[in-house]
Amino acid sequence: MRSVELAKSYDPAEVEPRLYERWERSGVFHEEPDPARPPFIISMPPPNITGRAHLGHGSTYTAMDILTRYHRMLGENADWLPGQDHAAIATEAVLVRELAREGLTRDGLGREKYFERAWQWREEYGGIIYEQFRTLGFGPDWARDRFTMDPGLSAAVVKVFVELYREGLIYRGVRLINWDVGSKSTLSDAEIENQERAGTLWHLRYRSEDGTGEVVVATTRPETMLGDTAVAVHPDDGRYRHLVGKTFVLPILGRRIPMIADAAVEREFGTGAVKVTPAHDPLDYEIGLRHNLPMPTVIGFDGKMTAEAGPFAGRERFEAREAVVERLRADGALVRTEPYAMKVPVSERSGQIVEPLLSLQWFCKMEPLAKPALEAYRDGRIRFVPERFGRTYEQWLENIRDWNVSRQIWWGHQLPVWYTPDEHVVVAETEEEARTIARETYGTDELRRDPDTLDTWFSSGLWPFSILGWPDRTPELEHWYPNQVMITAREIIFLWVARMVMLGMKFVGKIPFQTVFITPLVFDMQGRKMSKSLGNAIDPMDLVAKYGADGTRFGIVRQMRLESQELNFDERFADEARRFANKLWNALRYIRALPEGLPPAGTLPTSGELSLADRWILTRLAATAREVTDALYRFELGLAADKLLRFGWYEYCDWYLESTKLGGATRAAVLSYVLNALARLMHPIAPFVTEELWQALPHDGETIVTASWPDAGEIIVDDKAAEKYDVVRGVVERLRNARHEFGMNERAKLTVLAPAPLGREREVLDLIALHAGAEIVAEPANEGSFADLMAAITVRAPVEQLRERYAKELSRLRAEVERGEKKLSSESFVARAPADVVAKEREKLEAYRRELERTERLLVEVGGR
């Protein structure tokens, strides 16, 4: 127990950096694999090196810290494994902008020099989010920090790619991909934001070649009509059945295109007939494959129209849109236009509208990998919390498509692919192995390497096993795989969670984790997404400055609920958590100032020596320990925080601590014992203040971080005493309400009449007198049950105060009656005011008259006039 004098108030700004530095220096967050203890392992979702902490980290990463600290206190082999993602496209975008400010380009700098700059940037800025994590009190095993481009992880990436290629699961082909015109690279779906925008729906007329019919199609992208190779309708749409199979003439270009029937067409969209542009729309691409349609590309990788666009070749895509519309109007092919709300795919990296384009890329066949991952969920080996997100996972895997794994950027894992002068493909783990294969297979060792890199999600998909040393059979891999929990957000269930499951089962033969805990998305109080443009973004570092890390964490966690996946953040919860910490600090100061001193840690008097209040608070402590433990087991973190605040603030401080002001030989031991246990129960959520409390109390061990979790079964429980004390509390609440009804000052003594048989319950009466601020007067009464006698306790009305209160109320009511009568006696008011207004005034006057009569009677009853 620290013997230093305690500060008058708790100061997070002084305590938190001091304690974190001590924890990190001592290595308290580090673990080694220990087969003698059950593992509890969480792999940190690697934040981007370009990232900064936001409130989303507050819900997701705080949950990881809470559960790791909790399971460590249970004595398990608990470790939280940190790491960062190289964030290929995001980092490249930042670097390209920096180079541009210096008048340089990526290509001009060259790959080697560019990589030097990238690593330099990572060293300089990549650690910012880690420092913010430390400020928030997160305690991962920093000694095990990994980076997706570390040599070991990079070797694992290469090995997986090569093995998948040799099994025929990775291939090169032309398919439709998401193309970012700004960054000149393909994108994953996770790097695209579908923005709601006001657009236009153009209705275009296509005439049949034989002149016997026409069809009107609707489109939001008229420039792509230059790439149309069919018109499609639903096979059950009777409006067009007679036209299916006919040939139509494409406006402007005059290309002959068929009308086809396909079940993918939505009959309700537009006219029910749609233009089919296989090279520029995902749905049209699938239709094109099914019907073996040509796929001309009319928009190029530079965002300009290609030679296939005829007279519009070379024009920027949106400039071409206007020109195409004007030409259609001039040719009589534009029927009409209408406003149309639409979702536009926008690159999160460049801000440019994403183009679906056909491209020669590298792909991974997903169906063979998805089947075992689906089975693992369906047979219960993997569960989701909340469970409904398991269906999201299942739906993605049921409808999986091949994965475009190549990217046209430099920062990242370069494809382990080489080409001979004759364009033969060589895939190998090293360049030396590639040359050997090329010599033996193609008779040459002249090779050039593919400049593309892998999708960031490829290396992230290996994360749970690559950070444990795979492909080597390390002790970490043997004992810590699979992890126990993966904590993440719902928007990357497929992009990351499913891929970790697929790749983990493929290369390690086991699921990577047993439970997937999905944390809520964080919005502002109005339910809006936080963004700089709306001005509602909250920096968690600002919250820490105002409320401390504990206040910030506790405030966020209290608002987390499994039944809701939208956390509308209310800063008042953080402020309440800050005040809660101060409340506990003041309790600590009170305990430390007790003249009898504090006994050794864990020391309690025997049950027979304990007071009624002692037995009540210990019973409540045991119940709270059970409730919090159960809530953490079920991932109900918000419920756990609620239980802790209710117990610590209202039951321990407001009731039990106040009870100890009556004195008693047991109070110091019980106060210390309960606060020590409460600190341990709170520690996972509020690590700093609980360490400071624990260190200032009698305790065992060096730090609360490794202290044992309170066992509810070892705490003294007396349910009958607890029920008795709760009856006392009920009476006190009733007396406090009476004080309020009488309008009495908080410091004024209540006179309480208690049935005489309660005289034998001296402890009970003393508690009532203390908590209610009352003087107890015995009143003759017959014997009865304890509950009946307590129910008979009444307050002697404070006559003088009541006379004064009723007199004031009479003055007010008489004034209101006089005002109402005067108003209603005015002929002009009654004649000119609306009838309902006059009626309301009459109702108000009658109500005031009734209240006046009642108050006059009450005043007479207390001897007034």
Image (spheres, grey):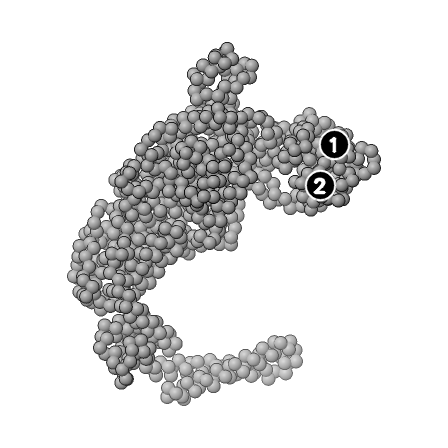
In the image, residue 628 sits, relative to residue 737, either above or below, namely above
Quadrant assignment, res 481 = top left
Quadrant assignment, res 593 = bottom left
N-terminal of the two: label 1 or label 2? 2
Residue at 40% across / 88% down in the picture?
860
Q: Position of residue 701 (x, y in %)?
A: 21, 47
Q: Residues within 10 Å of mark 1 (few under 14, many from 20)?
A: many
Q: Residue furthest front?
A: 379
Q: Residue 257 shows which numbered tag?
A: 1
Residue type at mark 1 is Ile
Q: Residue 407 shows which numbered tag?
A: none
Report helix, strand or loop for mark 1: strand
Residue at 76% across / 41% down in the picture?
241
Residue at 57% across / 81% down in the picture?
842
In the image, residue 478 sits, relative to residue 743, either above or below, namely above
Judge from the rendering whether residue 703 lies leftward or rightward of residue 505; answer left or right: left
Instruction: Say which residue label 2 marks.
Output: 235
Q: Residues within 10 Å of mark 2 (few under 14, many from 20)?
A: some
Quadrant assignment, res 760 = bottom left
Q: Residue furthest right?
A: 211
Judge from the rendering whether residue 861 lies leftward or rightward of residue 591; answer left or right: right
